[in-house]
Image (cartoon, rainbow, N blue to C red):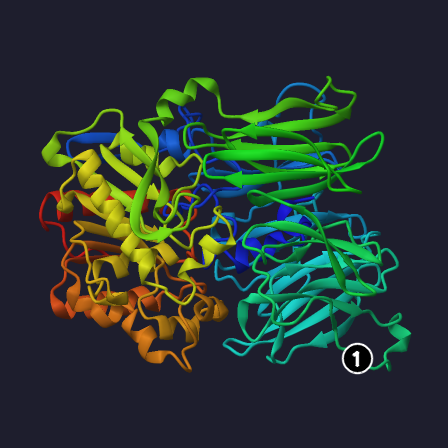
Amino acid sequence: MIAPLRYAFLPALLLGLSACASPAATSDEAPSDAPVDSAEHSADAASGSGDPTDYAVTFNGRQIDLRPYVQGFPYSRITPDLEQGHLLYFETTPEGTWMRTIDRLPEQGQVDLSAGVKLNDIDWSTRNYWGGEYNRTLEGLIFRGDERNDERINLYHLDLETGQVRALTDVDYIYAVGFSEDERLMAYVVRQGSEEPFNSCLRVRDLSTDQEQQIWCDEGGDDRLTWSAIEFDPANRHVVLTMQHDGDRRTTNLALFELPRPAEHDDQAVVAPRLLLERGTRHMRLGAIADTFDGERLLYISAESGQDALYTLDVATAESTLFTRLDHEISGLEIVQTSEAPLLFLLLEHPTGSILELRDLASGELLQSEKFEESVYVGDAFEGRLALSKSSVRTPFELDLITLERSGPVGRPIELKARRLAELPADLFEKLVHCKVEQVSIETFDNVESPDGPQLRTLHAYYFEPVHPPADADRLVRMTAFYGGGNYFSSANQIMCEAGVATLSPAVRGSSGFGADFAALNDGDLGGDEIVDLFFAARWLEANKGYQPHQIGVYGSSHGGYATMRALTFPPETNDHNDHYPFGFGLSHAGFSDIITFFTTSNIPDWVILEAGDPTTDAEKLRERSPLTHVERLKAPLLLTHGANDSRVPVAESRQFAEAASTTGAPLTYVEFEGQGHGISGLQNTLRYYRAVFSFLEGEVLGGGDSRGGEK
């Protein structure tokens, strides 16, 4: 099984609470600064292949060979299916991105990824793949994806023998999907309509007969279906999934749906869902835990208290009982079987690594805990085995097969036996790593309470310094506008370091990984105090690393693309701070420039309501927070990039800002990527992106504007 379909709460985390970040950023999405599913492209295995591609880029007298980063280890999204024993992954080549499979995992040693079978001739850089799950009834993989990189997400069936892909649905969007224990029934939520208010419906399909029933539609009302996974009870009489109230992502609920009798009873009245939790409570990170709904009880996660906690729920009485409180946010969870009893396997995320916890499933008692310097993610789990991928700011990708066995040493009753399944070749490390990494804390402007009284709030950040820095006059540093502070290996940061450009990656307020309260600090304040945090981070660079303001830039994609434009056009009077910062440049990918037009055209309007406000009541505020409104304040050089097929943040958002900037004479360069969606995928597109970035930095930032104008 594959994580995006397995965890009942993960879709809500990835799509519902992570703003408009890409839910599964792949390694060849050049602008992305979010964690990846597996390996980022690296190394140099394509030499001698006759590949005529030009991988060289130049910047400030340096020549950078991009081949080690984008082609040397051309494999990504490496996903084992431990139950079926096969492995699915993608390979990016100069001709396209291909899906490959290995039908049997080795008993010993590592997987030979070069031996995988190419499944079909689909170039997966031209469409989204959002993870799948093997289904015994259809004898193939059921996955979520699209066909044009436009996030018209549907369900598809992949025959792993023939490679044939066929559509199972033809709808506007799939919010949620889940399968019965016997894998015969598939329940899914369809979102219909091109703009708010959407009408979303729960449907159930019998995969053995292809008969389908529509269970309930929200008709754009107060109680709405949303991103979730779906849990069946063992008798296939009920399903539980997440609902949203009043268009507010923070106010969610668990809903119990009674399924009608088999298809011959089509005359049964539609039964509205029963809400299992108190309506109006702000649960934040809410969702049922997979494989825990036995018909009477289930386990669920909620951050109602400000930190993640697990609760047991009596479905009949709707009474919740605390199962265990957690010190950090959950990034992965599995029910694993051992020879004696099932265990709860938890991965907790913290700023500088992960914590593994093993708990008794019956009592919640902590049995064992282990810390990792890397960020660790569950790729799959079956019985007592787990596939774990690891990455950090200092180390690239590793994939391990973990076997859990009781009878470990005293004090550690469960032994974790690890076997390496895949990793980057050791001789490639020096070709990839060109940064010295430092974890830092940055004071910002407001106070937080502590046992010693009010203290200035500090922001977690990583600073990436080139191993071979340029002369002081040529130093540049780019600063992550949003989605910063992550502990994962970034090829983009290493490429910049090789070019002599440093990176500061701060986790500004609103970032995940620091508890629900911190993540909610920017709710309703989009473009406000989160931007002021960037000003304080820039001043930290001045005071601690010796940069001048004209050497400090800001960059990001999606929300980070908006934050980049906002930082460069920020009105000082915002939130009564009377503050601004004279950034030297900006790099914005797939950002929105007008919050109201973004709301009316995006496929995530509820995100706008959460982060910025309701356009029907807060239109004046939303216009004030829009970079387009203040385009005349743009003085620093700005590179805008965008995919033409983007529906998360439609391309019109960059086009209208570029057009408005052209009337003011602002130093803006615009590059559009035909056929691309919210990210940038594929080798040629990735190379084109980096050429655009280095041409911009050399001509506009170091050269003072000789290359202005760009391309479309």
Query: Which residue is painted at 86% across and 78% down in the image?
Result: 266
Numbered-mark total = 1
The disc labelled 1 sits on which kind of residue?
Answer: Val
Is residue 200 at all visible to an observer of this figure? yes
Query: Which residue is painted at 40% across and 78% down in the image?
Result: 615
Q: Nearer the viewer, residue 148 or 437?
A: 437
Q: Nearer the viewer, residue 238 or 285?
A: 285
Query: Which residue is painted at 14% across and 70% down in the image?
Result: 663
**With respect to residue 136, does 73 lie above or below?**
above
The image quarter containing residue 268 is bottom right
The image quarter containing residue 563 is bottom left
Query: Residue 96: where, in percent of width, then height?
Result: 47, 43
Query: Residue 114: where, in percent of width, then height?
Result: 56, 28
Query: Residue 382: where, in percent of width, then height?
Result: 75, 37
Q: Is residue 115 left or right of residue 297?
A: left
- The residue carrying mark 1 is 270
Split into 4 quadrants, where in the image is the N terminus?
Answer: top right
Q: Is residue 669 left or right of residue 241?
A: left
Q: Nearer the viewer, residue 232 or 442?
A: 442
Query: Which residue is painted at 25% across and 69% down in the image?
Result: 628
Query: Residue 90: where, in percent of width, then height?
Result: 54, 40
**With respect to residue 515, does 278 lie above or below?**
below
Split into 4 quadrants, where in the image is the C terminus?
Answer: bottom left
Is residue 672 at all visible to an observer of this figure? no
Crowd rating for badge 1 (residues with CA inside 10 Å; few <14, some 14–19, many 20+): some
Q: Secondary structure at mark 1?
A: loop
